[in-house]
Amino acid sequence: MTDFNRSVLPDDVRSNGATPNPWWANAVVYQIYPRSFQDTNGDGIGDLKGITSRLDYLSDLGVDVLWLSPVYKSPQDDNGYDISDYQDIDPLFGTLEDMDELLAEAHKRGLRIVMDLVVNHTSDEHAWFQASRDKDDPHADWYWWRPARPGHEPGTPGAEPNRWGSYFGGSAWQYDPKRGEYFLHQYSKKQPDLNWENPEVRRAVYRMMNWWMDRGIDGFRMDVITQISKTIDANGRLPGEEGSEIADNPVGEEGYSSPFPFCSDGPRVDEFLAEMRREVFEGREGFMNVGEAPGVTPDRNEHITDPKNGELDMLFLFDHVGVDQAASKWDVVPFEVRNLRARMADQQAAVKNAGWASLFFCNHDQPRVVSRWGNDSDRESRELGAKAFGMLLHMHRGTPYIYEGEELGMTNAHFTELGQYRDLEAINAYRQRVEEAKCQSPESMMAALALIGRDNARTPMQWDASKYAGFTAADTAVEPWISVNPNHVEINAVEEFDDPESVYSFYKKLIAMRHNNATIATGEWNLLDAEDEQVYAFTRTGGDDTILVIVNVSDKSADVPARIADLLADGVDESQILLSTYDAMHSVKSIARGELARWEGVVIQL
C-alpha cells in the first residue's frame, strides 16, 4: 500500500499529540452507503462489486480512506445497522470474496477501507441473542434482560422495567414470551443492546474485530460506540427499575423518558475503549479507528482521542449538526451561522493541545447540507452554497469526511409523501408523534422530514443523466430501493467530472490542499469575529505561515467584518488567493470594496 498522493507531515508539525504523526492527519475520508452507491446485478440495491467498479472515480477525486456503511449479514431492519452475523457479507451486497476483491483493488490504488461496526447492539436474529433467550444458556447474560415490573402482567402496558422510550419510537423494552422477560433496545426492537458489563461479550467482540483486521481491513468506524456503557447502581439495576438507587428522568411529550442521559458516555466507556485498543489494535500499524459519539462533549473528545489515553483516534460529535433543532429532533428552528460557529469553535478549542477532530456536515444520518442550511432552489445558488460549506468544513483542523455525492452538490430528496420514505426512524417518528402522541401536526412533521430526514442522504448516487442516474441500468426490471432524485439530470458525476468550475473540481482542490499544505492539515485554528451574523472567519497558523479563511454563509451579500478588513488593509493580490468559491479576481475585488457576494468564500495566504 502507498500513501497515495499525500505529503508526509514532518515530525516538527504537531497533529494529535502522537510522534510520529499518524498517517491520517492529512487524509480525507469518503463515506459510502453501499445500498445507494452502485448496483451491478440489477436488483435495485448497491453492492460491493459496484464499489469496486467506481474505485478509479474515487482515486481521481483524491480521497484516502473509504468508510463503508455496514455490509454484514443482516435482516435489514435498519439498513444493515442490525447485524445478524459479523463475519459474513449479506447476499444483498455480495460475498466475502467480493469483499476481498474490493480490499485488494482499493489497496492497489492506495485507498484504505474502514468498515462500519455496530457493537452496542446486534440484530435479534443474531445467534448470540437467540441463545440468550434461554436463561440456562451461557449467553443468557449477553443482553440487558429484565423481568416485568412487580405487580404487572408480563407483556402488558406498564409492565416494562422502566419508562424508557426508544429513539426509533415506542418503548425501549420488548417482551420475549420464550424467556418471559424484557430486553432493552435503545433503537429498533430488532436491535437488542449488548451487555458490555459481561467480559465474555467484550472478548467475543474483540475476536471478531481481530478477524476482520487480519483479513486486511484498515480499521473501523464504530456506530454509537459511546453508548456501550450504561449507568447502573451498586446492584446492577438501571435507573427507574424497581428498587434502583438511581431515579429516572421525567416522562416527555411522547409518553416515555429518555435512556440517553444514562446510556451515553457512561461510567465505563474509557475502560472499555482502552481495553479494545489493547486487544485489537496494539502492535498493528496503518489503521484508523473512529467512533460515533452520542452524548460526548468536546472536552471529553479531547480525552478519548488523546493518544496517551489509548482509546480512539477520532470521534464524531453531534452538537454542531443539532443547531437547527430544538427540544426534539423534529422541532426544527432556523439556521443561524453564529450557532454553528460556536459549536465548531468548542470542538476546535478542545483538541488544541491533544486529541483530534472529525469534520463533517453530511453522512448517512444527516440530510444534504446544501439543502439543509443552503439554497438549492437554482443551479447557481446550489453550486455556490455547496462550495461555501465545503470550504468552511475542510479548512478547519481535523480530518474531513465527505459523504457520497456531497462532492457533486447533491441535494435533499424533496419527498412530499410518507410513502416515499424507507427509513425506519422517519416512519416510526411520524406514527408516534403525529398519530399516537399527537404532539406534532402532520404538516409540521412532513416539513421536518423533508428537511432533516435521513433518507435525504440515501437516494441513489447520481452518476449520470440516465433513467436511474447510472446507479443501476436504465433498462433494469427492478427499480432502485428508494427513488432517484429527479434532479440527477442536472446534478451528476458525468456533467461535473471534466468541468473545472464544478463542485466536483472544487472538492478536488480542497482535498489537494489538505494533502499538501501542513498549515491547513494541522495548523492552529483561531476564530475571528465570533458574533458576525453572516461571515464565518478564522485563521490557520503554522510557524511563520498564516492562512485566512472567510466564508459568507448566507444567500445575501455581506460586509467584510471590521477585524478582517483591518487585517487586509493593505489589499490582497490575486496571487494570495489560494481558493475562492467564485474566482481569484472576483474575491480580490470583493475584499477591495469590503463586501462579499452571497456564498462567497475565500482562502487567503497572508
Image: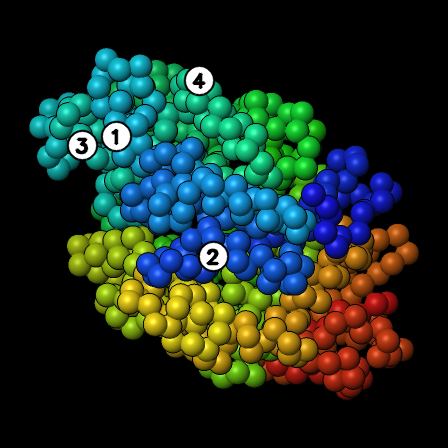
Q: Quadrant of the C terminus?
A: bottom right
- Tags 3 and 2 in contact by the CB under 8 Å rule? no
- Tags 2 and 1 in contact by the CB under 8 Å rule? no
Q: Is residue 579 left or right of residue 143?
A: right
The spot of residue 331 in percent (x, y) is: 36, 61
- Tags 4 and 1 in contact by the CB under 8 Å rule? no
Q: Is residue 354 left or right of residue 41?
A: right
Residue identified by numbered label 4: 199
In three-dimensional space, the C-alpha distance between marks 2 and 4, rounded to whole angstroms, equals 39 Å
Residue type, label 1: Phe
Q: Residue at x 9, y 28 (%)?
A: 153
**Is residue 156 at all visible to an observer of this figure?**
yes
Residue type, label 3: Tyr
Q: Nearer the viewer, residue 27 or 309?
A: 27
In three-dimensional space, the C-alpha distance between marks 1 and 3, rounded to whole angstroms, equals 7 Å
Q: Is residue 438 left or right of residue 184?
A: left
Q: Residues within 10 Å of mark 4 (few under 14, many from 20)?
A: few
Residue identified by numbered label 3: 175
The spot of residue 26 in percent (x, y) is: 72, 50
